Amino acid sequence: MKFLFLIAILPLATNALVPLLSLSVGDAFPAKALSKWGLKGKTSVVYFFGADDAPSCKKQSALFDESFDEFQKAGAKVVGVRNDAGDKGAALSQTLVVDEDDDIRNEIGIPKDFFVLGGRETYVLNKKGEVELVFNNQFNVDKHVELALEKAEELKGQGGGGGGFALPDFSEFLAGVGK
């Protein structure tokens, strides 16, 4: 019996298995959510968590909030999504929204961890609303922020991702003009 429990919990603790139903890199994030949360046409970080006052959820929100300025410099809007039961009215710099009846969570296919906890999943989206990064780990809340910020900064360096346009470097050409 202990062996079966270990098999059931190992993927959750190590992030060894990616949920089969959730979004993958390259997938489109639900347009309804993008519009509703003001993310259409913006590089965005959307993270799903349980409740404002649960210790690990509170820590995750606080970490995203501490990095708020860095995300802004990277050109990314951060939105934390919790279910209606988890809404305790936390006041943070980032946008916090309530996913009524877990509609978006269910549409995406974020599974419950341990069969009861709302899955902790973070997405980084390019300006076209396409998923650039997915991270699912119930325990390592620091890694959600770290990976999301790295990807947001990478997207900024690429012109925001999703077909953003960046001018070529003409410095060598211009240096030779007039010589």
Image: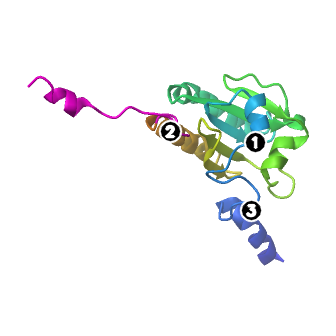
Identify the residue position indicated by label 2 in the image.
Answer: 155
Residue labelled with disc 1: 30
- Residue 167 is situated, as x and y percent measured from the top left of the image, at 38, 31
Residue at 59% in and 39% down: 126
Q: Foreground residue, 161 or 64? A: 161
- Part of the protein shown in magenta: 159-179
Q: Which badge, 2 or 3, is on the more N-terminal residue?
A: 3
Residue contact at pointers 3 and 1, CB within 8 angstroms:
no
Q: Which residue, as the protein is rendered here, is positioned at the far front?
A: 178
- Mark sitting earlier along the chain (2/1): 1
Calculate the distance from the C-alpha at mark 2 to the C-alpha at mark 1: 20 Å
Residue shown at the point (80%, 71%) measured from the top left: 5
* Cα gap from disc 2 to disc 3, whole angstroms: 26 Å
Instruction: Kindly state the secondary structure of the residue where label 1 is placed.
Output: loop
Characterize the local packing of mark 1: few (<14), some (14-19) or many (20 or more) Cα atoms within 10 angstroms.
some
Looking at this view, is 46 or 70 the one in front? 46
Residue 125 shows in this picture: yes
Q: Looking at numbered disc 1 in the image, what kind of residue is underneath it? A: Pro
- Checking the image for residue 20, the label placed there is 3
The residue mark sitting in front, 2 or 1, is 1
Q: Earlier in the sequence, mark 3 or mark 1?
A: 3
